[in-house]
Amino acid sequence: MADYLSVSDAERAAMLGLIGVSSVSELYSDLPKELRRKKFALSEGRSQQETYAALAELAGRNATYRSVFRGAGSYVHYIPSAVKSLTSREEFLTAYTPYQPEISQGILQATFEFQTMMCNLTGMDVATASHYSGATAAAEACVMCADKSKKVVTFSNVNPDTAETMRTYLGARGIELEVLPAYEGTADLAGAEGYGAVYVESPNYYGIVEDVAAIAAAAKAKGGKVIVGCNPLALALFKAPGELGADVVVGDAQPFGLPVSFGGPYLGYMAAKKEFMRKLPGRIVGETTDADGRRAFVLTLQTREQHIRREKATSNICSNQAHCALTAAVYLSLAGPRGLKEIAVKCASNAHYLAKGLAHAGAKLFYEKEFFHEFVTITPGKASALAAALERKGILGGLPIDKHRTLWCCTELNGKADMDEVIRIAEETL
Amino acid sequence: MKTVFEKSVKGRTGVQPSALDVERYDYASSLLRDAVVLPELSEAEVAAHYTALSKRTFGVDDGFYPLGSCTMKYNPKLHEEIAALPGFRDAHPLARADKMQGSLAVIDTLSAYLAGITGMDAVTLQPAAGAHGEFTAMLMVKKYHLSRGDKARTKVLIPDSAHGTNPASAAMAGFEVVTVRSGADGCVDLADLSLKAGEDTAALMLTNPNTLGKFEKKVTDIARIVHDAGALMYYDGANLNAIMGVVRPGDMGFDLVHLNLHKTFSAPHGGGGPGSGPVCCKAALAAYLPDPQVMRTEKGFRFRRSDWSAGRVGAFYGNFGVYVKALAYIVSLGGKGLRAAAETAVLNANYLREKISYFYPVGEGRCMHEFVLSMRKLRDETGVTAADVAKALIDRGIHPPTMYFPLIVEDALMFEPTETVNKETLDRTAEALKEIIDLAYTRPEELHSAPHTTPVRRPDEAAAARNPVVKG
């Protein structure tokens, strides 16, 4: 049995002696007797070797795929070895939230640098240290922006998990979420009234690049705040939402060096225009000087937070996804502006190659719109039949989103040969 | 130290993506942006930068970390290796459930263990952190009352000793917060509770042992008062480390529990996350757990949804990578090991407290896994504050305890040694504290200016908030 304790029997006896009790159970004398009498089963532990074997057996029950063409909020990218190696240093991995700045300058500076990277990518003035996922970042941004209007508008083409999470968070505060239909795959605000904020994704759930500027202008004309959800990898190519009229940008930065890991931990991010600085939910690191005039980093604007403001805080968030933010910062530091752009171009080029090939094979592009690295096809036969045919060959195909439609994703990991194989299997199946 | 941007040299890069083997796709220039400003560095330079930053960070392996309420126990290395197994690491969350039976088995097995440890019937692992678990539980409380047609329960009772996340979570779930007073012993004042519990009460949020490190002796009476009022009992699992394997919240009368896998169950805290905040509940509340749930069928595990669910609280299924670590921990220790961990955590806290009592007042009675010192006496007599003491501990290789919390203790310092620290470290910590307190009476200025061994000293937090510089 592995127990990770550091106390010998002799030391235990000496410690009990000093405290002045004969056994540890005396230290529990405040617990009511009827509770302590209650019996329940306590299992035996296992050695590290047995534990590893038991968990490895579970890991082995999951299918592994030669190539993956599924995204929909979880993206398989190449992760440089330096990312895992550097972020695995125990100082980063095991530290708590940096409440003591003198011995936390490393994690504070790394977070400050992450915030800067996200501001640069999104074209915003301030970014938070992280949120649980893109879904909760979107939900908290909506709560922040809803104001007194008690209504937020979004579209049927946003990530469904995100929409559901928004509904949960908004509903709890008595704020309505109106979901407008996206008939042509893109957002259309026409007819919406009386909302405090609009949430639009670009690229949206179908991979389509939205006309964010038009949506933002329409929303602003009615006094609504504009929240844009973005896969941040797309921002290596496309105009920053900040240039297009966004007030707040949110999303999940999982593509920046985090494995898919069955859906988490991922990296919610939130960036905003300056006027939201004191309304934002979550931790923010700021720069200041120390008692000797040296540059130093600290957690800042803490009067927004739960440990100071309690029920009047802008959010309840305490632990966030700090280590994931560090991971993204290391990834972005390695990739740099050119590397990140090349990766994004490769994702987009692969997706367009596959889309063209699938169209020839009989899986037509469903929305004829400009897209990034995801797209939707429609097939005469069942979408699930094609997915099953690919599955048999060890390929995780696109995600069937209804009977005949499939949502595909390509990343830089997909080679031409892999895509040609998918196209061939599609030809055979359809 | 320069920032990663200040080190940037135009033209450098740390990765060379492999070449395109299909035709390059070009977008209309109207869609495209100008170049993004990101650091330009070689891999060697990036490695040097982050290694230098790591050396300016204090982890659990760097020294004693008695940060109260945070349970900074040792994080076993084995768990990192297991979480990185390709079968877990590369599992796509939207692959078919029948192809991901290993991941679903992890969720199901861990849920079953947590139900057993807490004395509850049903579990969700979806919340990504403790506060997220609190929020989720409060959403369930709301659904529960509404499903019974009981619309008047708009208030949540919270003791004045509670963590700030409790009132913040209740407010996010749309409740009004009513504060319950603590008595002179630091425990819930039953008279005040009886006065405030009523037909408008949805739940009581209680941490037990509480934030003073005291077990709420009258917890079954508290539960009776709350239940008699028609409200629910919510257990904040922040301090479960004191009692796991010894007593169960479900037996104390609690209806819902949140746990912190990153504290109690050894997953590392990562400098502020990712955590994981599962919610466990009694059968009567199971229908309100967030979507989706994992269920066991004859053909294996699958996901299901509930018509009464409190909704979805995040993307996919939560911080799966953290579950793997917590499961490895529970499998390794077993119920007996968990109990030994709790008992040793309580032993270590009482030992350190006893040693401190030789030279500074520690209060009456004994403590559970943590204890709170009031530095008020020291401040009155010497002018040395709790913060001064904390910063002086840094110079002695010790991470400071939690400062100025709980709010009901003046000048509080909250120590939580955990079970993994050794006696020698506890002895050395008591000696360091004695030396600091002695110094307060002789050369207090040395403490006012501490720490003296760190790259920065007492950053100006007020200035940082007044004129925020939040990007480089």
Image (cartoon, rainbow, N blue to C red):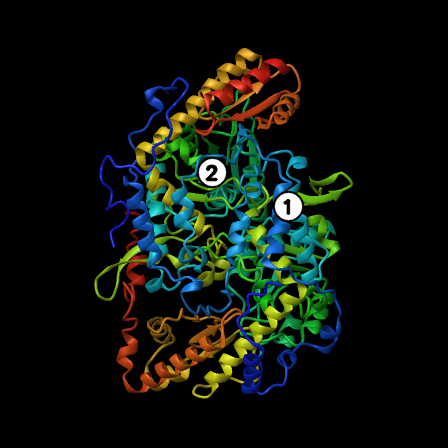
* Residue A367, placed above or below residue B338: above
Tell me, for residue A197, which label it has, or none. 2
- In the figure, residue B403 lies in which quadrant? bottom left
* Residue B157, placed above or below residue B377: above
Under circle 2, the secondary element is: strand
Q: Point out the image quarter for the N terminus of chain B.
A: bottom left
At label 1, the amino acid type is: Leu
Q: Is residue A252 left or right of residue A290?
A: right
- Image coordinates of residue A257 in percent, x first then y, are 43, 41
Under circle 1, the secondary element is: helix
Residue B267 seen in this snapshot? yes
Disc 2 versus disc 1: nearer the observer:
1
Q: Are there few (<14), some (14-19), or many (20+) residues within 10 Å of tag 1?
A: some
Contact check, label 2 and label 1, Cβ < 8 Å: no
Give the letter of the chain under mark 2.
A
* Residue A186, placed above or below residue A46: above
- In the figure, residue A202 lies in which quadrant? top left
- Image coordinates of residue B311 in percent, x first then y, are 63, 44
Taking the spot 59% from the left edge, 17% from the top edge, the residue there is A426
Tell me, for residue A58, which label it has, or none. 1
Residue B315 seen in this snapshot? no
At label 2, the amino acid type is: Ala
Q: Are there few (<14), some (14-19), or many (20+) residues within 10 Å of tag 2?
A: many
- Image coordinates of residue A287 in percent, x first then y, are 29, 55
Between residues B266 and A9, which one lies in front from this camera angle?
Answer: A9
Give the letter of the chain under mark 1.
A
* Residue A16, placed above or below residue B327: below
